[in-house]
Every structure is written in C-alpha cells, then in structure tokens.
Image: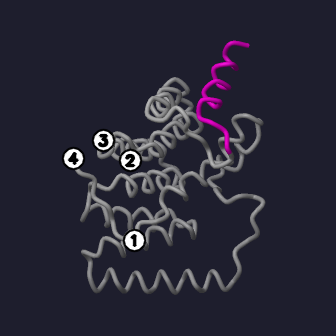
Amino acid sequence: MAKKKVAGYIKSENVIWFVVASLLIGFVTGVAFGIYKSGTIADPHESAPSADMDVERQQAIDMLKAQTEKNPQDVTAWVDLGHQYFDANLPEEAIAAYESALAIEPENANVWTDLGVMYRRSGSPDKAVDAFDQAMTIDPTHEISRFNKGIVLFHDLKDEKNALAAWESLLALNPDAKSPGGQTVQELVDHIKEKHDD
C-alpha cells in the first residue's frame, strides 16, 4: 500500500523522539520517571516559553481554527492545529484536531503516532497503544510508533514483556535505532534484560 504524505507535515518524528528522550535516559540512570509519570514532557533544562511565544502560538491557533472552519476538509490545517495544541500541552484539543485530520485521511502513520502521544499525555495509555498499532498497520516500517509503544507499555502499563517485544521489533527493522541522546535501543533492551539477570 502506498503511503500518503500530508503536505506541511514536518515535525511529528522530531517531536516524538524529543518526548521520549528523557524517559530513555531514565531507564539507564534511574531518573526522569517522575517527569513522565506526571505527564510533563518538557525538557527540565529548557527555559519557559516567553509571553511573545504564547501570543504567537495563540495567533497561529486562531488562524488555523479559522482555516478549518472555512474548509473543514483541509487536512494540513487540522494537522498543524494538532501540532500547535501538542506544543501548548493541550492534549484534548490536540486529540480532537488529529482525529479530524484522520477522519479525512486515515492512512497517515505520523498523525496516528502523534495522536498516540496525546492519548498518553491525556492519561489514556491503552488508546495510545492502539494508535501506535494503527500507525504500524499503515506503515509496517514505522520506527517511532514501535519505540513509543514500548515506552507506554513499559512505563505506563507495566507490561515489560510486550514493551521488549515492541523494541525488539524495532531493532529487527533498524538494529542501529537510537534516541536523540545517542543511546541505542539495543542498550535499552540489554539494560532491562540485565536487571532480570541480577
């Protein structure tokens, strides 16, 4: 099946990897679990966004909402609106925007993946796993959905066996898969397995 691409869809994969970077580090160092447990995904070392950024984001949201009202079939506007809400830490609004995009174009693995992250952030890990599974059904080579599925299974659902299976399926596709911090997924898997051997 040919993969469709949404015009203007730039940030999904970078955002998702950023979202899980601190959690990955936590697996090795034993920290950062609390950050993710509370639903916060921002890098604790980043400064807070300026008031100007908030104004700019609100203006972008208002513009995109007007676009979707004028043309409810504008997939790009729905996706971009979802991204704005994603970055503003408004998961319910992001979910609604991404679901509107998927109602028009359901075969977009990246949007399903972003939707999964928003489900996780809204406290619905089972729905997050379902969204990641949908992304993998659409694109069996989709790496980020496999990685994120492992995160949610391991951290939120405490399902270590299936988390390892998700990460091992990623390694079967890309043995060199890495986090933005440089840690390989193989190191993550090995670390978890070593804990059981001790």
The residue carrying pointer 4 sits among few (fewer than 14), some (14 to 19) or many (20 or more) residues within 10 Å by Cα, namely: few
Give the distance between the C-alpha atoms of the residues marked 1 and 2, in whole angstroms.
21 Å
Label 3, on which residue? 137
Q: Which mark is residue 8?
A: 1
Give the distance between the C-alpha atoms of the residues marked 1 and 4, in whole angstroms.
22 Å
- Which quarter of the image is occupied by the C terminus? top right
In the rendered image, the vertical position of residue 125 relative to residue 7, given as above or below: above
Mark before the other along the chain sequence, 1 or 4:
4
- Disc 2 to disc 3: CB gap under 8 Å: no
Give the distance between the C-alpha atoms of the residues marked 2 and 3, in whole angstroms.
10 Å
Of badges 4 and 3, the one in the foreground is 4
Give the distance between the C-alpha atoms of the residues marked 4 and 2, in whole angstroms.
19 Å
Mark before the other along the chain sequence, 1 or 3:
1
Give the distance between the C-alpha atoms of the residues marked 4 and 3, in whole angstroms.
10 Å
Q: Residue at x 51, y 40 (%)?
A: 147
The residue carrying pointer 2 sits among few (fewer than 14), some (14 to 19) or many (20 or more) residues within 10 Å by Cα, namely: many
Q: Element at badge 4?
A: loop
Label 4, on which residue? 1
Mark before the other along the chain sequence, 4 or 3:
4
Q: Which residues are magenta?
A: 182-198
Image x and y of residue 133, in percent: 37, 41
Badge count: 4
Q: Which mark is residue 131?
A: 2
